[in-house]
Amino acid sequence: MRAGIALLLVATLAGAALGQAASDDQQRPGGATTVEVNGRRAFSLAAANLTAEEQTRFAVGNSFFRRNWVAAPASTGARDGLGPLFNARSCSGCHVNDGRAAPGEAGLLLRLSVPGRDAHGGPLPEPRYGAQLATQAIPGVPVEGRLQMTEQALHGRYTDGTRYTLQSPRYRLAALRHGPLDRQALLGPRIAPQLIGLGLLEAIAEADIEANAAAQAARGDAIRGQANRVWDAPSGQQRIGRFGWKANVASLAHQTAAAFAGDMGITSRLFPLTDCTAAQRECLAAPSGGAPEIEDDVLAEVVFYAATLAPPLRRDGGDAEVQRGQQLFQQAQCAVCHRPSYVTAQPPFPRLSSPALAGQAIHPYTDLLLHDMGEGLADGRPDFLASGRQWKTPPLWGLGLIHGVNGHQRLLHDGRARGVLEAVLWHGGEADASRKQVLAMSRAERQALIRFVESL
């Protein structure tokens, strides 16, 4: 026990000693890509170090990201192919202002599966409704159903007696067009996250992610992250997952093409099939916008756009309360999973990214690993190596700007948390000791912790 306390003290003192020097560096979370911006456009600017030609690519990708797609046949051949089933008409329909969705909006999707694994080791789609519940459809095709959500209040107290209330969501499907779900169906609600810094996360070397897991295993305590190994369609290989709430996607190209297919019903060379099942006659008979419906060059521009959305400048890094919050963040062991910094390697798909993203000292605050977060957050739905209790550590950069971009601060995989502190209180499993340390903090310490996280 004494050795553990001594190690914690050394780490804390080292963090405090490095505090000022680190704050100068951490002012630019995306290194040279960082942009200085607040308000609604805080997540919408291109990396600051792109060339003029790359800025043009960014603008082209932005146009395809924001404009609505239409059903085929249509006079606009470059943007037809929507549906037959879909959840949004554009990428920005879920990622409003390139930001985060909230419960009750289009950006809350419901993944569907049954026990078992597909040919690549991923989830098996639900037999009647496919991999995702579609709540919209083109004319002549019935929507699959509606997702309804209610919330149950959970009351608790901090050690100082202050009361808090969490909202536990409950999900129900209504107006199902093709009969009931399979008796073993697994439901996975997923909120659309903000998009900043994705290309930088993609450029983190796999060796760094594996080193995170090795370092945590060597600690000998409850924190023991695991890399997800997933099928990556662009490379045709199993790779370490780093995108999605369960790290179930390895590359931005896969993520983008899968979102076109699942969220908008638009096929690509990587995902050539619609999500129509054998039970959906009208869906199978619907007109196609081509084979594929989005060409490789258009998809590439959207991937480039997502890869080069820049993290914004950090705020208030020199503030005394923020620096106190940073010390508390370290003392509560939050930084074990929310690893502060990396130096990026070369992006894995140069044609779909920019060399400007390589060699950057970045501060995303994530280990990109899966962690058992306890029964309170469990969805019971495995995804490749991720269990029903495991979630990827999300990056924290830009968290304090979500309200300015989207008018809310709903956090976690389904948006149940109404701010940083509620998100911490939902932590269980491997993070339970950190949660208990936060419960024992004074009101001033909790406020300092929030100020630090929201400054990132």
Image (cartoon, rainbow, N blue to C red):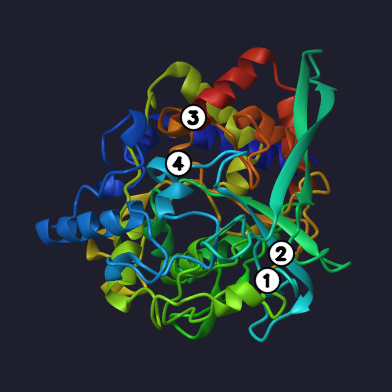
Amino acid type of the residue tagged 3 in the rendering: Glu
First in sequence: mark 3 vs mark 2: 2
Q: Which of marks 4 and 1 is in front?
A: 1
Would you call the spot at circle 4 few (<14 residues within 10 Å), some (14-19), or many (20 or more)? many
Relative horizontal placement of residue 344, taking residue 417 as reference (left or right): left
Amino acid type of the residue tagged 1 in the rendering: Gly
First in sequence: mark 3 vs mark 4: 4
Q: Which of marks 3 and 2 is in front?
A: 2
Q: Quadrant of residue 295?
A: bottom left
Q: Distance between the residues labelled 3 and 2?
A: 33 Å
Where residue 454 is drawn, which disc sits there? 3
Q: How far apart are marks 1 and 3 (CA)?
A: 38 Å
Would you call the spot at circle 1 few (<14 residues within 10 Å), some (14-19), or many (20 or more)? many
Q: How far apart are marks 3 and 4 (CA)?
A: 8 Å
Q: Which residue lies furthest to the front in this view?
A: 140
Secondary structure beneath disc 1?
loop
